[in-house]
């Protein structure tokens, strides 16, 4: 039978073991460290920026205020290039030409050569303008040819009058002076009654009634 002293010893021993065990557990816990709560912060979303259009360069000349090379953007159109050159100088345009004849909506490309027709630069266009003016006039007299002032090109617009006969009319006029009547044109070599009948209603001479 255990004595009170023996029981007290065993109780103290048990308390000591429990205390030492708790200390060991606490020490291990402190050394290993319990993982804390991981907090994930939101990352900033990169701002999307528009990619700038590549720069292109074009030359524009002719009847514009400031011909030269201009920097444009991809997708720009002819009207933008004209505006960059200071716009059209209408005083330089041929008499029968206007911007309605050009497609201003076409897109320009790098290294483009753009040209707005200008008076004197395109002789063939000038001749075309002259022919349009002669054939497109509204009054009866304006649609007729004056034998005393007409050029070779104007005379060629008459039926049956080619370049050779037109030149012959001009040469006759230079040699003999102005025509006095339309019938006198039959004095020109190569122009007979048949030719005269085909052109009589289309010609007149200055100073006489058409």
Image: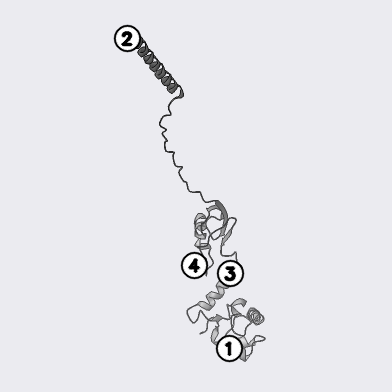
Q: Name the N-terminal-most of marks 2 and 4.
A: 2
Q: Nearer the viewer, mark 1 or mark 2?
A: 2
- Scheme by which the image is coloured: one colour
Tell me if residue 88 can be seen.
no
Q: Which residue is mark 3?
A: 125
Q: Residue 26 falls in which quadrant of the image?
A: top left
Could you classify mark 3 by the number of other residues whose Cα lies within 10 Å: few (under 14), some (14-19), or many (20 or more)? some
Image marks 1 and 3: residues in contact by CB distance under 8 Å: no
User: Under tag 2, what secondary structure?
Assistant: helix
Q: Residue 206 falls in which quadrant of the image?
A: bottom right
Which residue is depicted at the point 55% across and 72% down? 129
Q: Name the N-terminal-most of marks 1 and 3.
A: 3
Residue 198 is marked as 1
CA–CA distance in space, label 1 to label 3: 29 Å
Q: Name the N-terminal-most of marks 2 and 3.
A: 2
CA–CA distance in space, label 2 to label 3: 137 Å
Q: Name the N-terminal-most of marks 3 and 4.
A: 4
Tell me if residue 168 can be seen.
yes
Q: Residue 120 falls in which quadrant of the image?
A: bottom right
Residue 161 versus residue 62: which sits nearer the camera? Answer: 62
Q: Name the N-terminal-most of marks 1 and 2.
A: 2
Location of residue 86 in the rendering, given as x and y in whole percent from the top left corner = 50, 55
Viewed as shown, does residue 108 lie left or right of 45? Answer: right
Image marks 2 and 4: residues in contact by CB distance under 8 Å: no
Could you classify mark 1 by the number of other residues whose Cα lies within 10 Å: few (under 14), some (14-19), or many (20 or more)? few
Location of residue 196 in the rendering, given as x and y in whole percent from the top left corner = 60, 88
Q: Which residue is mark 4?
A: 100
Q: Nearer the viewer, mark 3 or mark 4?
A: 4
CA–CA distance in space, label 1 to label 2: 160 Å
Location of residue 190 in the rendering, given as x and y in whole percent from the top left corner = 67, 86
Q: Which residue is mark 2?
A: 4
CA–CA distance in space, label 2 to label 4: 126 Å
């Amino acid at each position: 039978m255990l004595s009170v002293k023996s029981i007290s010893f065993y109780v103290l021993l048990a308390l000591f073991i429990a205390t030492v065990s708790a200390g060991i557990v606490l020490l291990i816990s402190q050394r290993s460290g319990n993982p804390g709560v991981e907090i994930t912060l939101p990352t900033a979303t990169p701002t999307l920026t528009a990619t700038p259009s590549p720069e292109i360069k074009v030359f524009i000349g002719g009847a514009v205020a400031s011909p030269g090379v201009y920097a444009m953007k991809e997708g720009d159109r002819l009207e933008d290039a004209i505006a960059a050159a200071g716009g059209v100088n209408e005083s330089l345009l041929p008499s029968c030409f206007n911007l309605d004849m050009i497609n201003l909506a076409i897109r320009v490309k790098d290294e483009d050569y753009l040209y707005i027709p200008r008076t004197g630069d395109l002789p063939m266009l000038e001749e075309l303008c002259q022919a349009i003016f002669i054939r497109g006039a509204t009054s009866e007299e304006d649609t007729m040819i004056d034998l005393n002032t007409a050029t070779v090109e104007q005379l060629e617009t008459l039926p049956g009058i080619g370049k050779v006969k037109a030149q012959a009319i001009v040469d006759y006029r230079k040699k003999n002076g102005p025509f006095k009547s339309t019938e006198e044109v039959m004095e020109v070599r190569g122009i007979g009654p048949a030719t005269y009948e085909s052109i009589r209603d289309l010609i007149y001479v200055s100073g006489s009634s058409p």
